[in-house]
Image (spheres, grey):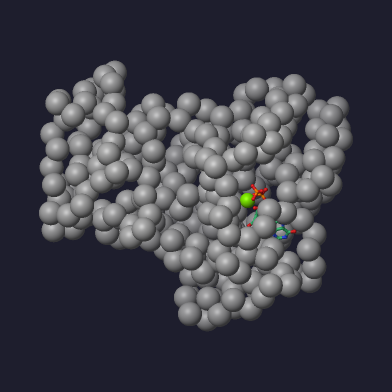
Amino acid sequence: MPTSQSLSPSLAAAQAPLVRYYSVCRGDSALPLKNLGIEEAFIVPDFDLAEELIARGVDSSRVAISGEAQDPGYSQAAGGKQLVPASPFEFDQSILIVLPTYNERSNLEALVTAIGQYLVADILIVDDNSPDGTGQLADELSCRYRHVHVLHRARKEGLGPAYLAGFEWALHRKYDRIIEMDCDFSHAPWDLPRLVHRSGTADLVIGSRYVPGGGTEHWNARRRLVSRCGNTYVSLFLGSNIHDWTGGFRCYRRELLEKMNLETVRAKGYIFQVELAWRAVRLGANVHELPIRFSDRVQGQSKLGWASLIEGLTAVPKMYFRN
Ligand SMILES: Nc1nc2c(ncn2[C@@H]2O[C@H](COP(=O)(O)OP(=O)(O)OP(=O)(O)O)[C@@H](O)[C@H]2O)c(=O)[nH]1
Ligand SMILES: [Mg+2]
């Protein structure tokens, strides 16, 4: 049972002198969880147990997955709340993270670095000729790091076309797993290994704000309302088998994307996410939602606009009646 009395705290002095770990074992899951202090974390042997804790409200940035090792090998990120593993998680599958960018110069390099701390994966930056020079920075990063690639597009056309171009690039190169992620730190890099692990048994994994353990951080009331209403509206037409239709932190298996007839997708904005999730459902894919905490961007500007909302209002009924 994960309370301060019943758990066995152990200090991993050499690696992370500031973190006090509370180990949680299988069978502890029915009991109340300890409220973590700022320098405390849970340590679990595997991803499945980590997911149990996160679904019960534990912050995923404070869960160390130790595997067989006695010493978790994590350290506390300087200036951040999150734990950082001694080395990034590595999976047998080849993984590509597609990062669409438009004016993300202030976030890009930090995000590429952060991703590398958590997951061994290639990264494809899909830039729509950002006026702030994101594309040039992407080129510099790709010269510096072999795992970083860049796709330049002539002009801003929206999230949907950028992702479609990234998916085409990925499918052509036969990546096993293709990840969608925003380039503004709204999606936590430490959740990447969780997504990939879960994709072992799901065709599509959606990082979800609207399942137990998920949520939003630092969002104002207007943003929360728009997102909630948007998802409710979609569910009215397409059903509530998915709770976060618009979520854009996802891991697709290549085989699913190959079946999706991507060349017929026209959606440009948010609705792109709904359209692909709906296609996955219609194909009978195994879709799993994994709780995530979505944070508001700190640097750069949101591109969410009225055009995207209006596109969504009309596109959802069309999607429903088309099938
Ligand atoms: N290539 C490309 N990327 C885009 C375009 N529009 C948005 N993006 C990127 O897509 C990701 C999500 O866009 P955001 O502006 O964060 O929009 P959002 O996350 O839906 O909205 P916020 O929650 O307000 O940030 C970011 O990495 C953007 O830079 C576009 O037209 N082309
Ligand atoms: Mg964003």
> In the image, what residue occupies the spot 81% across and 28% down?
320
Asked if residue 133 is positioned above or below residue 49 in the image, the reply reads below
- Expressed as whole percent of the image width and height from the top left, the position of residue 5 reads 14, 26
- Expressed as whole percent of the image width and height from the top left, the position of residue 193 reads 41, 49
- Expressed as whole percent of the image width and height from the top left, the position of residue 288 reads 53, 33
Q: Is residue 68 visible?
A: no
> In the image, what residue occupies the spot 84% across and 29% down?
317
Rendered-image quadrant of the C terminus? top right
Q: Is residue 147 visible?
A: yes
> In the image, what residue occupies the spot 27% across and 59% down?
86
Asked if residue 128 is positioned above or below residue 57 in the image, the reply reads below
Pick the front one: 87 or 185 = 185
Q: Quadrant of residue 44?
A: top left
Q: Quadrant of residue 314?
A: top right
Asked if residue 149 is positioned above or below residue 288 in the image, the reply reads below
Pick the front one: 283 or 122 = 122
* Number of marks drawn: 0
> In the image, what residue occupies the spot 85% across and 40% down?
310
Rendered-image quadrant of the N terminus? top left
- Expressed as whole percent of the image width and height from the top left, the position of residue 303 reads 72, 54
Along the horizontal axis of the image, is 289 left or right of 166? left
Asked if residue 142 is positioned above or below residue 315 in the image, the reply reads below
Along the horizontal axis of the image, is 32 left or right of 124? left
Along the horizontal axis of the image, is 92 left or right of 1? right
